[in-house]
Image (cartoon, rainbow, N blue to C red):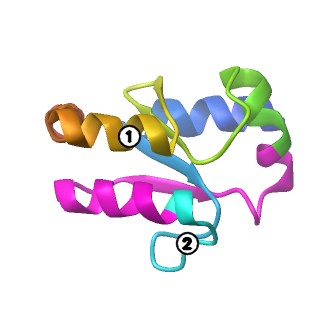
Amino acid sequence: MDIETLIKKQIADNSVILYMKGTPQFPQCGFSARTVEALTQVGEPFAYVNILENPEIRSTLPRIANWPTFPQLWVKGELIGGCDIVMDMVQKGELAPLIKEAAVKA
């Protein structure tokens, strides 16, 4: 399976997926850590991909997503954005309902 097909399959197979540096237990950058913290507070499970262990995903996903940085949060096949957008959604009370709805449909 080529890398682009793999990425599209990951996004399709997981209603909430975070492409991040490190893992939720050991984030390797502050932006990934803040995003994981926000998702964890929602209380629903989410998938993740450690892009530091997947250099092909790290180089290919920005082109597919048209989003140059990580982390990248995808919900129901749609790119939500990075850390700043997630934090903005938390402040506006928009993240939890979005994640909970996606988890129900999963």
Of pointers 2 and 1, the one earlier in the residue sequence: 2
Q: Position of residue 96 (x, y in %)?
A: 17, 41
Residue density around tag 2, few if under 14, some if 14–19, many if 20 or more, within 10 Å: some
Q: Residue at x 73, y 32 (%)?
A: 68
Q: Position of residue 39 (x, y in %)?
A: 31, 54
Q: Position of residue 83 (x, y in %)?
A: 48, 45
Q: Is residue 15 above or below residue 42?
A: above
Magenta-tinted stretch: 33-58
Which sits in the foreground, 64 or 29?
Answer: 29
Q: Is residue 7 visible?
A: yes
Q: CA distance from mark 2 to mark 1?
A: 16 Å
Identify residue for label 1. Answer: 86
Q: Amino acid at mark 1?
A: Val
Tell me: 104 left or right of 72: left
Which is closer to the viewer, label 2 or label 1? 1
Quadrant that contains the N terminus: top right
Tell me: 89 left or right of 33: left
- The residue furthest bottom is 26
On residue 27, the disc is 2
